[in-house]
Amino acid sequence: MKKLLIGNEALARGFYEAGIGLVSSYPGTPSTEITECLAQYRDIASEWAPNEKVATEVAFGASLGGKRSVCAMKHVGLNVAADPVFTMSYTGVNAGMVLCVADDPAMHSSQNEQDSRHYAIAAKLPMLEPSDSGEAYAFARASFALSEQFDTIVMMRMCTRIAHSQSIVDVGEREEAPDRPYVKNPQKYIMMPAYAKARHPIVEARTKALSEYAETCPFNRVEPGADHSLGIITSGTCYQYTKEVFGDRVPVLKLGLVNPLPPQLIRDFAASVDRLVVIEELDGVIETFCRTLGLAVEGKSLFSPIGEYSQSVVARAFGLPEKEYVPALPDLPGRPPMMCAGCPHRGMYYVLAKNKVTVLGDIGCYTLGAQPPLNAVDSVLCMGASVSGLHGFNRARGTESEGKTVAVIGDSTFMHSGVTGLIDIAYNGTNSTVIILDNSITGMTGHQQNPTTGLDIHGDPAGKIDLEALCRSIGIRRVRVVDPYDLAACDAAVKEELAAAEPSVIISRRPCVLLKNVKKNPPLAVDAAKCRGCRSCMQLGCPAISFKEKKAVVDATLCVGCGVCRQKCAFDAIG
Amino acid sequence: MTKSVMIVGVGGQGSLLASKVLGRVLTAEGYDVKVSEVHGMSQRGGSVVTYVKFGERVYSPIVDLGEADAIVSFEKLEAARYAPYLKKGGRIVVNTQEIDPMPVINGTTAYPSDVLERLAAAGITVDALDALTLAEEAGSPKAVNIVLMGHLARNFGIAPEKWLAAIEATVAPKFVELNRRAFRLGYEA
């Protein structure tokens, strides 16, 4: 049956049909839908894990236990999962296992644009890279046979343009994969030095066997073209841009298995063309490999290692004419993303900005607190870094800093890797103040459950981590909960905890206003007769409040009646 | 010959549903189709864009500068932002609704008042309609997306019945009538 599916949905369908028994992941754009789509098949155990390392280890355990398993993450999630991944290269699998990693060239919703292919090379793992939804589906179906044949995890590299583009997929039926028996095998599964030393040669032999397999595997193909003055090696989304520009005019070596690369196939292709060019987004991985083969090749001399490509980028690199277009109108106001009207993070951020507190931030919707007019955040690095970073910052700057610096971190991010930083604060003892912005959901990636919500991936009741009890059990004695819609309470909590001579945690708790079960209040309105036009309410950066004809105006279609602006108004004009 | 449509607007306006309907119409017509959008940050009130491409064989999922046969803009300022993506001789269907972005809300800059005039002066065919009022007339302001699809359908060469079938297959049963009305109002506008 033909369906229009996004790449992530197509992968999920392929995995389902390949008979997988388990998926465990942590959400991260652009990878989230792989797991969300798999969760719709109730004959698979589908779970959100607290972080990518845990997810990978759960999938490892399931593979060891005999079921085909999947884990999915964004590119930076692979940094978190790298520890089990590198050693799983040595243990191999029992039932097949596939690790999906979604890169984000151009950083549509990421903090860096690292190229995951380096991980496949460093961990010596095979990596597939589909170029549309049809291939995502086909590669997903085929990946488990590959995993089991070569006794290895298979990595599946996606990128934003494949993950979130729909194309037509001809889907099939699920084939059950019988559970494999678990047989105790210390030499294979206990990676202590004596056994690991024996496994390393097996890894090297496997890479050699995979390279030989790559020469003739169905994932790589040469597409002929009449004009041999140029030949292009490409993979993934760049293949589509290449074909859009050149059609069937020039020969193309289209790689679907991007690690290990096929030396002879590449040599033969190079020999058949006058000029060899590699088109690959981010780093020159294939190009570098070509150079090690001693081939004359061009790549990053024509293309940037920064950002995404497109058909125009490809055309420009070859000096081909570009499309005519109307130049952009000058001076158009930008439209940056912002915290929603009624967002529970806003009140706390306002209080932090007003008190001129230095804020080490973290990854989530609340990163938007860095935007004007709040400008409330000083640093954002990676998941969990706010908490451990705060400890180091306070160590460096001493008591004065402890009284005016905080970490802010969401509930899901705290579960992911913030709690370990808090353990460090409790253990090594700085008088640090950590604010957990608990909106009872993983927000930025589109509302996934997490260990603090009490619900599982299906929305069914699950274990619920008690944040207050967790923080206290670590040894934080000062733990308090505030409602971020109450500015006075937030102000008092921040001032008191910053002044306290011991570590403290403030849980700023109110559910995300976009959650369906959250009751909205009637919209507020500005009494124009009372409004003095002082713009005090405008400091909140609420998208529902604008300023027209020297008065504040509340947009009733956006306002959810949170009342934060009413508390800001000194003239009682908002009600 | 591949054709391209861009659907642009502000996060939360319902462009996702519009692209689903369009994708379904084109798939039913037997075209190869690609629909591409970016999720994530852009959903939080930011500028959003969806590319829809169709033809015998579609390669690139994205629409580049000067390539769109039509742009459907859910918001006036966004029409101006993406105008350079329009092919020479292409058409912009634009909802005249204005949604202030943060730099306008906080008074850093003003909402440009003459966007449509400037686009027309640049030689672009601007097909403007008040989709919000029409959606309200149909029964819900949320039906702006289907009003705009209705208006796009006028010069698209695919019979209205086929669009209505795609709408029926896409929206929840209780919203079918509302969206049929919205489509009609947009089509006739």
Image (tube, rainbow, N blue to C red):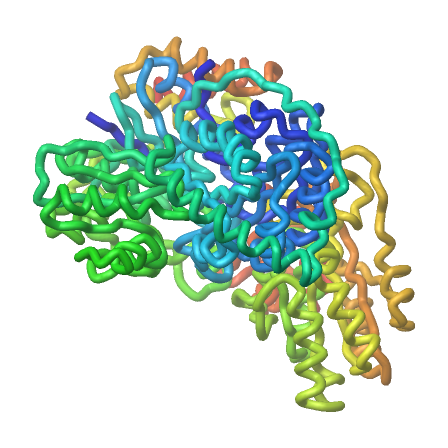
In the rendered image, residue B188, in percent from the top left (x then y), is placed at 35, 18
Residue closest to the eye, B98 or A253: A253
Side (left or right) of A44 relative to A481? left
Taking the spot 90% from the left edge, 60% from the top edge, the residue there is A469
The answer to whether residue A14 is seen in the rendering is: yes
Side (left or right) of A197 relative to A181? left
Taking the spot 26% from the left edge, 56% from the top edge, the residue there is A293
Residue closest to the eye, A269 or A505: A269
Height in image: A312 above or below A548?
above
Residue closest to the eye, A142 or B42: A142
Height in image: B147 above or below A244?
above
Q: Splitting the image into 4 quarters, where does residue A417 fall? A: bottom right
Residue closest to the eye, A218 or A417: A218
Side (left or right) of A15 relative to A59? left
The answer to whether residue B95 is seen in the rendering is: no
Side (left or right) of B142 relative to A511? left
Q: How many marks?
A: 0
Q: Splitting the image into 4 quarters, where does residue A425 fall? A: bottom right
In the rendered image, residue A107, in percent from the top left (x then y), is placed at 44, 56
In the rendered image, residue A3, in percent from the top left (x then y), is placed at 46, 20
In the rendered image, residue A49, in percent from the top left (x then y), is placed at 71, 47
